Every structure is written in C-alpha cells, then in structure tokens.
Amino acid sequence: MQNIDERIVRNIVESLPVGLMVISPEGDIVTHNAALCSILDLDEEKLSSASWAELFIEDVDRNTEFNQVILDVIERKTVGIRHIVAYEKTGVKRRRLCITSSFLQEGEALIGIVFLIEDVTDKYDMLEKENNYLREIQGLQSERLEGLNKLAMSMAHQIRNPLMSIGGSSNLLLKNLSLDQRERDLFDSIIYGAHRLESIVQAARAFASIVEPRQQEVSLSKILRMSCEKASAFSVNLGRSVAWEVPSTDVLLQVDPDLFEKAILVLLFNSIEFSVENEVAVSIGVIEQDNETLISITAQGIGVSSEDIPYVFDPFYSTKPDGVGMGLTVARRIVMEHGGEITLTSVAGKGATATIVIPCSNSNSNLCSLP
Ligand SMILES: Nc1ncnc2c1ncn2[C@@H]1O[C@H](COP(=O)(O)OP(=O)(O)OP(=O)(O)O)[C@@H](O)[C@H]1O
Ligand SMILES: [Mg+2]
C-alpha cells in the first residue's frame, strides 16, 4: 500500500496542468501523468506499457521534430533547452508543444530524464497572428519609406541641375565682369550659397540611397582596420594626426560590411573634427554581452552640452560652421537597419563617446521564442 508521502506526490503530479513523463536511461517510460495522455492524445494503457521508442518513433514521418528533440535529450543529453515543436495525430488538430527536460539524479548516477510537455497551441497561434500583423505593418512602413526615399532622390535630382547653373553662371560672371568689391561680395555669397545647397542635396541623396543591408559574417577587426586607415587619411587633410587604440581580439558580426564601415567612419571623422588638439587620441572598445556586441569610440574634444545632446542625431543639425549635419543621421539609419542602436554621450569640454549596440546572429532558430 502506498504511503502518505507517495500519495501526496502522485496527487501533485496528476494535478499538474502540463504533461510529465520520466524516461529511464534505457528509454523506458517510468512514469507519466494524465495531462500527458491528453496532450499527446495517447491512452493511459499504451503509455504505461510501451517504451519511448515504440510510442514515438513509430510515426517517423509526421512527428520528426518532436521525436528528434526527445532523441537528442536521451542520446546527446541536451537537457535544459526549451523547444517548440509541432505534434500531429490522425483526426486531431495539429498542436504546438513546448518541451523542457532535466536530469533526475541519485548522487552522481543518472536515474532518469524528466520531460515537461506543455500544449502551447493557443499561445503559438496568437503569436503567429501578431507576427503576421507586424509583418503587414512593417511591409506598409517600408513601402512608405521607399516612397519617401524616391521622392527625396528625385527632388535632389531636380534641385541639382538649376543649382549647378546658378553656381556655374555666377562663377563665369564673376570672372568676366569688371565689378567693384561690393558686387564681388554679392557674387561670392551666391556661389557660397550654391555650394552649401549642393552639399545639402548630396547629403540628402546619400541618406535616401542607403540600401537594405546585405548581412554576412564579417570580422570587426577588418572593418576597424580599414576605417582607421581612411580616417587617418582624413585627419592628414585637416592637418591632424591620430593615435589609435584598438582592441587586440576580434569579433564576428552579422552586418553589411560596406554600410557598417560608413557608420563607423562617421564616428571616427567626428572624433577627429571635434578634437581640440591636432594630435587626436581615439580609443575603440568592443564588448560582447547578452547576444549583443557593443562598439564604443571615445575621444577627447570639445564635447556636446547636455542641452544639445538630444539633437545630434537630427537631420541637418550641425555646430560646424560649414557642416551639413547628416553624419550621425546616416550612421543611426545604418545601425537601425541592422537592428541595433547608437548613442552619443559627452561631457562638454572633455570629449565624447559614441556607442553602437548590434545584435549577434542567433543560430538556434528552433529555440523557444514564446514568453
Ligand atoms: N565626437 C563629437 N564630439 C563633439 N560633438 C559631436 C561629436 N559627434 C557629433 N557631435 C555633434 O553632433 C553634431 C552632428 O554631427 P554630424 O556628424 O551629424 O554632423 P556634422 O559633423 O556637424 O556634419 P557632417 O554632415 O559633415 O558630418 C555635430 O555638429 C556636433 O555638434
Ligand atoms: Mg560629422
């Protein structure tokens, strides 16, 4: 006769809303509860008398994923991972099951494997509906964005031609006419205005022509090395030089190398341009944490006041006398297209740190994504 403790344990097991099954190291079903019978749609008698292999492997073609998860746990001891798999039985609606597993041990010895099997069909269907809805919204948004990009590109194109003729004609007149100083100054300001407008149009074109990233596995060290070389050349043009501090270890990123280099270059150029000294020390840090890679770029310089910080990513915001103010806007768009984030922190008068956070690729596509 069962003692009272065993009866209590049995009651708890039977009242669990999830299916429970314990399999011996040899593959026999040692125990299970009633919820398991109803979730797997198997009768009590069959579950009590059969081994795991007889029950589940028999329907190889239909429940491959389900069988594979159980097999992996038993043979490869891959416990502790949540899997969502499809489960089918003739005459019953296709279900989605969430399987978790753990070892049952006595001292060092393995005496069984515990499976918890939950029917998550309703949650899964709801999530699917939500995902479809989100995909629809994303589709509409990207259609709108594409329309705006096309508009920006064609406006830039239309503005560029008259702008060239304003600049070109003014230059010609300035050369050919005999003008007094005041008239020369007026022509100079027309030419300067035409140049400014051309830079703005070019920046708008560059922003509108950012393509969808073609992500691939790339070495961050390689991108940083090439970016630093280009930024060094840029610094020479400004009569400056850079002392680089770059991490010695490498990280692999899932990014579009050309686009990502553009974003990094914006941050390096800013570090050089907003330095107070002609010798600039730029330090690049890389940290990997929680499925993300953090890339920080720090340099001493004039910095940004806390009142101005909220505007630095706005289009055409610039504190440079001839600045267009699209560098950080472009960098942010590129990082966001990669599913990441970018921030700028600064202490006015001391310097600034720009940080990119980029998600790592997830190769375990069959892992649980439900809350
Ligand atoms: N490292 C930095 N140090 C100090 N200020 C910065 C730094 N990076 C950005 N800023 C501030 O943010 C503004 C916007 O930067 P952004 O790169 O978008 O434009 P810009 O450099 O002014 O012009 P450009 O279009 O030529 O890049 C800058 O004008 C400056 O005020
Ligand atoms: Mg800039």
Image (tube, grey):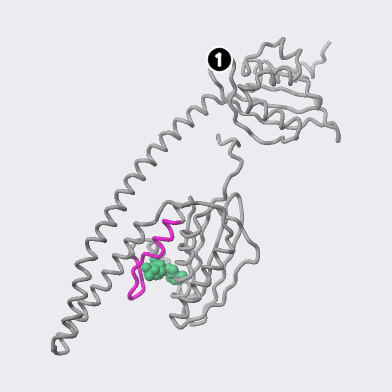
Residue 51 position, x and y percent, is 76, 18
Q: Amino acid at mark 1?
A: Val
- Is 70 rendered above or below residue 235? above
In the rendered image, which residue does mark 1 sit on? 92
The one nearer the camera, 256 or 186, is: 256
For the point 39% across and 64% down, which residue is it? 312
Left or right, 141 with reference to 280: left
Q: Position of residue 101 (x, y in %)?
A: 70, 31
Where does the magenta region start and end?
317-334
Q: Is residue 42 left or right of residue 183?
A: right
| Frontmost residue, 195 versus 324 | 195
Q: Quadrant of ligand 1?
A: bottom left
Residue 320: say if magenta: yes
* Residue 304 appearing in the image: no
Q: Residue at left 39%, top 61%?
A: 329
Where residue 87 sits in the image (x, y, percent)? Answer: 60, 22
Q: How many callouts does the rendering have?
A: 1
Q: Quadrant of residue 94?
A: top right
